[in-house]
Image (cartoon, helix red, strand yellow):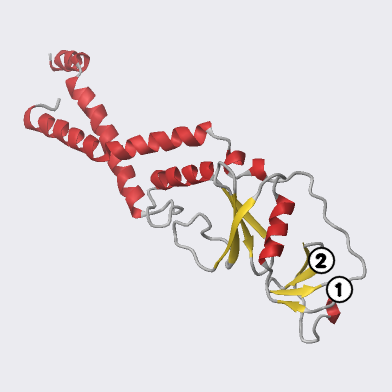
């Protein structure tokens, strides 16, 4: 049975560890509750996506082999901007599918048309900007750049991101997603980039949390009258 100075040291260690990591324990609990009580589809903005989108059909398209004699085609996709067809070739070149003319990215008007095609009706755009770089904490991190960000007159501060190079609809961001993202950062403790689950801070606090819990069990063990009675019987 642990007594005296050792027991006192365990109590002090447990108390100070609890104070040190208590706030992080609270954030883990709050973020965990938020994650479990929210619908992940709503967080991803599925309620803003238009349902039943039908791909437009085109005729009179030129053969991809006629685009440019020096192009060796590895991949090709048919894209539509403002009811005009385009080939997205090899993941880097955009050609008009009727004229074969090379297109250097999309315009703001085309980005707005792409957004309107993919999100629910009735939303009014208030601003559109071209972004070429973002920080590690930006809500559009790890997506294709450059991109157009379209802000809407909507209570959830809705923003839609469209790739400027190929016109791909990238993602939707809104108020609930931003809360989720902030709490995710506090949960993973990746205060540099938010998404790294293997960072050293999380590992250290996880170990300290384990030590705190184990020291609590140990305190119960050395303080329990029942355990003391058992030890007395064993000694007799």
- Disc 1 crowd, CA 10 A, few/some/many (<14, 14-19, 20+): some
Q: Is residue 5 left or right of residue 68?
A: left
Secondary structure state at the residue bearing disc 1: loop
Contact between marks 2 and 1 (CB within 8 A): the answer is yes
Residue at screen point 72% across, 51% down: 118
**As drawn, 231 above or below 198:** above
Camera-side residue: 47 or 201?
A: 47
In the picture, residue 21 is in which quadrant?
A: top left
Q: Is residue 207 left or right of residue 106?
A: left
Camera-side residue: 48 or 2?
A: 48
Confirm whether residue 209 shows in the render. Answer: yes
Secondary structure state at the residue bearing disc 2: strand
Confirm whether residue 150 shows in the render. Answer: no
| Tag 2 residue | 84
In the rendering, which numbered label is found on residue 86? none
Camera-side residue: 9 or 226?
A: 9
Location of the C terminus (image quadrant) = top left
The CA span between labels 2 and 1 is: 9 Å
Q: Is residue 1 left or right of residue 167?
A: left
Location of the N terminus (image quadrant) = top left
**As drawn, 113 above or below 183:** below
Residue at screen point 89% across, 71% down: 61
Q: Position of residue 196 (x, y in %)?
A: 44, 54
In the rendering, which numbered label is found on residue 98? 1
Residue at screen point 33% across, 36% down: 25
């Amino acid at each position: 049975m642990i007594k005296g100075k050792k027991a006192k040291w365990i109590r002090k260690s447990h108390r100070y560890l609890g104070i040190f990591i208590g706030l992080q324990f609270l954030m883990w609990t709050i973020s965990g509750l938020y994650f479990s009580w929210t619908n992940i589809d709503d967080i991803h903005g599925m309620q803003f996506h238009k349902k039943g989108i039908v791909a437009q059909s085109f005729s009179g398209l030129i053969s991809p082999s006629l685009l440019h004699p020096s192009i060796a085609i590895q991949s090709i996709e048919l894209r539509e901007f403002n009811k005009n067809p385009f080939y997205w070739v090899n993941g880097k070149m955009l050609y008009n599918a009727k004229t074969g003319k090379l297109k250097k990215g999309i315009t703001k008007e085309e980005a707005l048309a792409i957004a309107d095609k993919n999100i629910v009706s009735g939303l009014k755009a208030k601003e559109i900007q071209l972004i070429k770089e973002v920080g590690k904490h930006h809500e559009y991190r790890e997506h294709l750049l450059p991109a157009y960000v379209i802000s809407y007159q909507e209570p959830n501060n809705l923003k839609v991101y469209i790739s400027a190079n190929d016109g791909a609809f990238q993602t939707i961001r809104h108020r609930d997603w931003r809360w989720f993202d902030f709490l995710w950062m506090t949960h993973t403790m990746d205060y540099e980039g938010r998404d790294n689950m293997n960072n050293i801070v999380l590992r250290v606090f996880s170990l300290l949390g384990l030590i705190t819990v184990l020291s609590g069990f140990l305190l119960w063990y050395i303080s329990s009258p029942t355990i003391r009675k058992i030890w007395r019987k064993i000694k007799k």
